[in-house]
Image (spheres, helix red, strand yellow):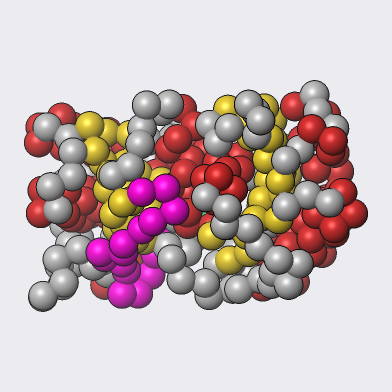
Amino acid sequence: KSNINILAIETSCDETAASVVRNGREVLSNIISSQIEIHKIYGGVVPEIASRRHIEKINQVIEEALKEANVTLDDIDAIGVTYGPGLVGALLVGVATAKAISFAANKPLIGVHHIEGHVSANYIENKELEPPFLCLIVSGGHTHLVLVKDYGEYEVIGKTRDDAAGEAYDKVARAIGLGYPGGPKIDKLAKEGNSRAIVFPRAHIEGAPYDFSFSGLKSAVLNYLNSCEMKHEDINRADVAASFQEAVVDVLVSKTIQAAKDYNMKKVAIAGGVAANSALQKAMKEACIEHGFEYYHPSPVFCTDNAAMIGCAAYYEYIKGRLSGLDLNAVPNLRI
Ligand code: KG4
Ligand code: ZN
């Protein structure tokens, strides 16, 4: 068969998303129903509310994805769905829906790892990109350096010991009163600030050159804010945002470049919500040019959670014959 169409579903956190992807790289539709407006009232994602909202939205989102792609279920070859990691109640909505469609329409089912989805987002706009490459995955829940050896074959060479990069962005944003989700807001505010104004720590871990730690940086920002308050000094929020961001970006870029050199990789890619960050994009691009690596990144819409990336990853599982059974279950702490 010449064309393989995957219907993909993603509900691991606070976006209800469905997409139709052809041959792993061509996105025919990409529908995302964001819950940010509801969760921001609470300053972060409330798992119970997320699950309920997914249930309310999922059927409509899938119908829209099929309609926009101009296909019906008959044209679909397989159903791909995120089964972990993520919020268990949220994941279950996608998994149960995918299983129901798979059973009723008699289509193969493919459980997809969320992080594998983020990595695969790079295939959408970079048609020539093929493994092997090094990928930095930075999202709200994960900070991983991964060797992508082949489609569906990964080796994690480093990860965060505590907070994820996006988590640090969200916590610092909250501390300077920017609200949820903090990443995009810090990104914007930092453009007006001086990134050299305050020196925040860059954590390097003895004996683990590719591991990350962001909790010390987060504490340093909180301490700085507290000490300003105690001394009744004005806080320049743009300077705090810019200086914090520079510390994060410095560490992410230097460890990625070091790993690419050590593992003799020629291509470097980034993925996940924080990969949408303009300062990270700029610094990673410059570093890759300087060190002679080819640099790949998805557009912002494919960096943050979406179902198209799940459709890409599902395609490569499909052609390898790695299908799931109807006993597929949500695995909240699934490892890569
Ligand atoms: O990949 P994603 O949508 O969800 C997870 O799998 O976690 O990532 C969400 C994270 C949030 O922490 C958000 O603040 C961060 O990505 N983020 C950003 C930017 N856009 C989203 N962080 C920094 N700069 C951005 N422009
Ligand atoms: Zn994600």
> In the rendered image, is residue 98 in sight?
yes
- Whether residue 228 is visible to the viewer of this picture, yes or no, is no
Q: Residue furthest right?
A: 104
Q: How many numbered tags mark residues here? A: 0
> Between residues 241 and 31, which one lies in front from this camera angle?
31
67 w.r.t. 268: above or below: above
Q: Quadrant of the C terminus?
A: bottom left
**Residue at 28 percent of width and 44 percent of height:** 133
Would you place residue 54 above or below residue 126 in this image? below
Q: Is residue 155 magenta?
A: yes
Please give left or right for residue 211 compared with residue 87 in the image.
left
Residue farthest toward the front in the current orientation of the protein = 1
Task: Place residue 222 in its image quadrant.
Answer: bottom left
Q: Residue at x 35, y 36 (%)?
A: 130
On screen, residue 93 versus residue 228, left or right, reads right
Q: Position of residue 273 (x, y in %)?
A: 47, 48
Viewer-proximal residue among 1 and 51 = 1
Q: Quadrant of the N terminus?
A: top right
Q: Whole-percent x and y of residue 171? A: 44, 64
Residue at the spot 84% in from the left edge and 38% down from the top edge: 73
Left or right position of 186 against 251:
right
Q: Residue at x 81, y 28 (%)?
A: 71
Q: Which residues are magenta?
A: 150-174
| Front residue (pair 200, 50) | 50
> Horizontally, is 185 left or right of 207 in the view?
right
Residue 87 position in % (x across, y down): 63, 69
Residue 231 is situated, as x and y percent measured from the top left of the image, at 27, 69
Q: Is residue 179 above or below residue 123?
A: below
Q: Is residue 269 magenta?
A: no
Residue nearest the observer in this picture, 129 or 249: 129
